[in-house]
Image (tube, rainbow, N blue to C red):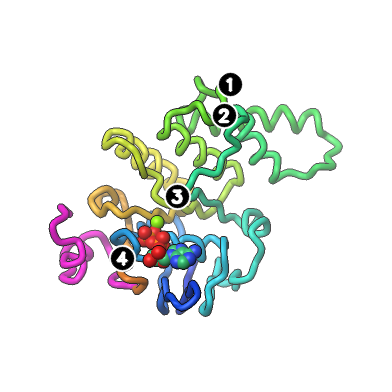
Amino acid sequence: MPEPILRAEAVTKRFGGFTALSGISASFLAGQLTAIIGPNGAGKSTFFNVLSGSFPPSSGRIFLDGTDITHTPQHQLAHMGIAKSFQITNLFPKLSVHENVRIAAQALRSRFNLWAARDALDLDGEVMALLARVGLTDRRFEQADTLAHGQQRCLEIAVALACKPRVLLLDEPTAGMSPQEAREMMDLILALNEERTVILVEHRMKLVMGISDRIVVLHHGTLLAEGAPDDIRRHDEVRRVYLGQSV
Ligand code: ADP
Ligand code: MG
């Protein structure tokens, strides 16, 4: 049984008087692809943001490899091996595809490097490899905001990968995509999972069933179920929540 690489312990998140997450405990195992699913408003993005350190929980704790990272600053988390891509685009829209990835790759390196020139060459090779990984080699000189929506999501993943993460967190990477684009994105995510732990937020249950090792189901800010896809598919309460949707 693999160890949890990331773990949430009794996480609660309040926004004013509203409780968006209520005492959620869940483990994400090293090397696995775990999907966090649930209807819109279930608390998936809130949980994603707490897990990835975007904001702290109101109470409860987050552990990375057993180390408490609940109050660790964002930039430090990137160095510890957590990278994320949000539901909302956060690229540099006026920079090229190549520049967006290059900035992210550069951010991980020392600014004072004796071998700066050689390092720059290495960096370029690394950026090209990342662009090839997400299928954007041909678009590398284009301005990020001129890319099609699906390609922008792929670019965000390349930016996240530039931090060489051990844990890659993705919040609805298929949002706004055609069914064909969504399937291609799932293929990419599955391939990326061969080399790292992936945590994927997705509200469409059907899309993640075939590719996930484990599924975490949220509903009204609580943990409704957690288990292998087959267990989740058969789970009475999950079926009730997803009633009318094909699973
Ligand atoms: P999901 O991603 O599953 O659709 P969210 O985590 O975005 O759900 O939201 C869960 C609930 O928390 C929703 O009712 C939403 O309105 C509320 N919520 C999310 N973010 C905030 C915020 N910053 N302030 C107030 N309420 C919020
Ligand atoms: Mg969301």
Residue at which label 2 appears: 97
Q: Are marks 3 and 2 in contact (CB under 8 Å)?
A: no
Report the Cα–Cα distance between label 3 and label 1.
25 Å
Residue 28 in view, yes or no = no
Q: Distance between the residues labelled 4 and 2?
A: 35 Å
Residue on which the image places disc 3 = 87
Q: Where is residue 24 in the image (x, y as percent from the top left)?
A: 41, 75
Which residue is most to the front? 17
Residue in view at x 31 percent, y 65 percent: 217
Mark 2 or mark 3, which is nearer the start of the sequence? Answer: 3
Image quarter (top left, top right, bottom left or bottom right) of the N terminus:
bottom left
Q: Distance between the residues labelled 3 and 2?
A: 19 Å
On whether ligand 2 comes within 8 Å of the CB at mark 3, the answer is yes
Type of amino acid under label 3? Gln
Would you call the spot at circle 1 few (<14 residues within 10 Å), some (14-19), or many (20 or more)?
few
- Amino acid type for the residue under numbered disc 4: Val
Instruction: Read off the magenta span.
Output: 223-247
Nearer to the camera, 222 or 62: 222
Residues tagged 2 and 1 counted as in contact (Cβ below 8 A): yes
Q: Is residue 52 covered in magenta?
A: no
Which element carries disc 1, helix, strand or loop?
A: loop
Q: Earlier in the sequence, mark 3 or mark 1?
A: 3
Q: Which residue does the numbered mark 1 point to in the structure image?
A: 141
* Residue for badge 4: 217
What is the secondary structure assignment of the residue under circle 2? helix
Kind of element beneath mark 3: loop
Badge 1 residue CB within 8 Å of ligand 2: no
Q: Residue at x 28, y 33 (%)?
A: 180
Mark 2 nearby-residue class (10 Å; few <14, some 14–19, many ≥20)? many
Nearer-the-camera pick, 42 or 60: 42
Separation (CA) of disc 4 from disc 1: 40 Å
Q: Quadrant of ligand 1?
A: bottom left
